[in-house]
């Protein structure tokens, strides 16, 4: 399986939990898709207001300040890529709640129908790439959206980013391009430039044990296509009060 498995789609939706997730995890795939003429759309579930990080040098006194700043950073990064995101504004850190899971699934299915999307790319609900609960939740919501859409005879493919980088679909990444995009998230990232203008990640920030998992994303993103198994095809879409996610 190669990148053509992705690029054969003409309309793709990339679903993320936070403003910087798109650039960190999916910007390589988005660029490759755009190069092949695919229409790429983005949906961001939260404004990341629960974060305690702020490397921007500007004070952010309240969660609302954080949300506004992080959304502005995301809008700027998307604009550089020729994209405009759809922001849901759901509570950061709360996407696992059944109410928000249902809202996410409903939003994803609505956007898929509205834009005739044939594939969704997102996080794996098993590990969320880095174990982040919001990442896992949006992966579950995407799977639930596919159940709902299948019941309405709108068939979509689903792709999860692979955290161990052993996925079937490998997308080469231009490190300097990705670093330039990440640098726009000034509250969350520490990216520096040397005398020649070459970008590099801050050593103290990027080389802590919990961030080692992100290093391969500067050279390659890998994805797995989620099979449409019999259970998936047969399972009816569940309402919020009774959702049991795979």
Image (spheres, helix red, strand yellow):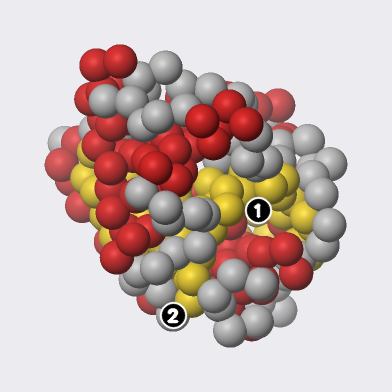
Count of numbered circles in the view = 2
What residue is drawn where x is 42% and y is 52%?
153
What residue is drawn where x is 74% and y is 51%?
222
Q: Is residue 123 visible?
A: yes
Q: Please indicate whether residue 160 sits to the left or right of residue 97 in the image.
A: right
Whether tag 1 and tag 2 are in contact, CB under 8 A, the answer is no
Establish if 188 lies above or below 96.
below
Q: Please indicate whether residue 164 sits to the left or right of residue 245 in the image.
A: right
**What is the x, y in percent for residue 159?**
62, 49
What residue is drawn where x is 50% and y is 62%?
118
* Along the line of sight, the residue nearer the viewer: 234 or 5: 234
**What is the x, y in percent for residue 120?**
51, 54
Q: Which circle, 1 or 2, is nearer the viewer?
A: 2
Nearest to N terminus: mark 1 or mark 2: 2
* Along the line of sight, the residue nearer the viewer: 70 or 93: 93
**What is the x, y in percent for residue 112?**
38, 58
What residue is drawn where x is 69% and y is 47%?
225
User: For mark 1, does the 10 Å Cα neighbourhood hold few (<14), some (14 to 19), or many (20 or more) residues?
Assistant: some
Q: On the image, numbered disc 1 is attached to which residue?
A: 201
Find numbered disc 2 in the image and state the secondary structure of the residue it sits on.
loop
Establish if 240 lies above or below 66.
above
Find numbered disc 1 in the image and state the secondary structure of the residue it sits on.
strand
Q: Please indicate whether residue 144 sits to the left or right of residue 66 in the image.
A: right
Mark 1–mark 2 distance (CA, rounded to whole Å):
24 Å
Q: Is residue 71 visible?
A: no
Q: On the image, numbered disc 2 is attached to which residue?
A: 82
**What is the x, y in percent for residue 185?**
43, 56
């Amino acid at each position: 399986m190669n990148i053509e498995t992705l690029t054969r789609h003409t309309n793709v939706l990339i679903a993320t939990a936070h403003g910087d997730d798109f650039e960190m995890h999916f910007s390589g795939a988005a660029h490759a898709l755009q190069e092949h003429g695919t229409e790429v759309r983005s949906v961001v579930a939260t404004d990341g207001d629960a974060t305690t990080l702020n490397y921007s040098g500007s004070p952010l006194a309240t969660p609302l300040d954080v949300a506004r700043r992080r959304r502005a950073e995301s809008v700027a990064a998307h604009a550089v890529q020729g994209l405009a995101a759809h922001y849901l504004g759901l509570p950061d850190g709360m996407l696992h709640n059944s109410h928000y899971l249902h809202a996410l699934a409903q939003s994803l299915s609505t956007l898929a129908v509205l834009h005739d999307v044939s594939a969704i790319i997102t996080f794996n609900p098993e590990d969320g790439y880095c174990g982040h609960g919001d990442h896992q939740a949006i992966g579950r919501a995407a799977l639930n959206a596919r159940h709902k859409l299948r019941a309405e005879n709108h068939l979509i493919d689903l792709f999860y980013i692979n955290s161990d980088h052993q996925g079937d679909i490998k997308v080469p990444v231009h490190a300097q391009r990705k670093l330039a995009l990440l640098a726009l998230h000034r509250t969350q990232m520490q990216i520096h430039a040397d005398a020649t203008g070459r970008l590099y990640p801050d050593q103290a920030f990027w080389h802590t044990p919990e961030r080692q998992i992100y290093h391969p994303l500067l050279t390659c993103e890998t994805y797995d296509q989620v099979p449409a198994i019999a259970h998936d095809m047969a399972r009816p879409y569940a309402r919020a009060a009774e959702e049991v996610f795979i």
